[in-house]
Image (cartoon, helix red, strand yellow):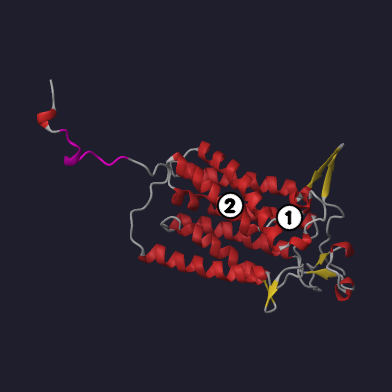
Amino acid sequence: MILSIPSPSRGEIDIGPLSIHAYGLMLLLAIVAATVLTGIRWTRRGGDWDLVFQVAVWGVAFGIIGARLYHVITSWDQVPDEWWGVFAVWKGGLGVWGGIFFGVLAGAIVVRRSGASVLAFMDAVAPGLLLAQAIGRWGNWFNQELYGEPTDLPWGLEIDLQHRPESIDLLQQDTFHPVFLYEFTWNLLGVLVLLVLDKFIRFRPPALFALYVAWYTAFRAFEETLRIDPSHEWFGLRLNFYVSVVLFALSIGFFIWWQFFHRRGEPSPAGARRLPPPGPSMAVPKSRVRG
């Protein structure tokens, strides 16, 4: 191959005597980027950084738990056969669906308890989540995972033999579709699209979050037709293909209904719980006023 994308020979980065797992480093960078972008968007809406940091701490913690739980449940055969295998996130194996669900749920509880609007915060965090997913995909590159079918395209990805599924045909191939790079590019483009749309269109929260889900799942459905790593299949298609299609349809349907047909008061971004102005029903009867 004259042109191709090489893969790292190992998944660790050595800094002096320290050996840092690149997968974990990419997750850390993803978390920082998402927190910064969300913080900027939330404070511009009248919120404060303290709430963003609280959501980041709890959302990330439960997001990692949910992501690992989803992977363990749906891909148990890929978990290392050791007592610590269930916890070995540094070897990869984080299901994005479980991570988003648990992370958003934990973040929503934190926002709710603070008195701010959960729906408004969901729109504020949407581009940040997509940015985090884009950066996190480089961890898959270091682990030589998340690649697709063999290809002779100039941007084909080199994969070492020990990281390929056990198949005679695959062992004889040279390069594969760099699915991690495809998703990185799509997600990064999605961040720009969401930011531009949010600048010129008045969305009714959480309509922008619904668009984020639709954008991601649209490509994820296509991505699942390229991937060749082990996965549960129904009727010849991977499990996550069906999950992506269902979530895409639900998010698009919700967006259309919520943005154009549903009528209700829009939430206040930084402080949803506010007392109504005094009215006649709140006035103190004169007969009860004592001098």
As drawn, the residue found furthest toward the bottom would be 235
- Compared across the picture, whether 188 is left or right of 204 comes to right
92 and 13: which one is in front?
Answer: 92
Residue 116: horizontal and vertical position, in percent?
A: 43, 43
Classify mark 2: helix, strand or loop.
helix
The residue identified by callout 1 is 138
132 and 107: which one is in front?
Answer: 107
The residue identified by callout 2 is 102
Residue extent of the magenta highlight: 275-284
Q: Kindly report the distance in space between the C-alpha atoms of the residues bearing marks 2 and 1.
A: 22 Å
Classify mark 1: helix, strand or loop.
helix
Kind of residue sitting beneath label 1: Trp
Kind of residue sitting beneath label 2: Phe
Residue 118: horizontal and vertical position, in percent?
A: 46, 49
- Label 2 crowd (10 A; few <14 / some 14-19 / many >=20): many
Residue 73: horizontal and vertical position, in percent?
A: 69, 60
Q: Nearer the viewer, mark 2 or mark 1?
A: 2
Rendered image quadrant of residue 243: bottom right
Q: Residue at x 55, y 39 (%)?
A: 54
116 and 106: which one is in front?
Answer: 106
Q: Tell me, yes or no, if residue 188 can be seen here.
A: no
Residue 223: horizontal and vertical position, in percent?
A: 67, 69
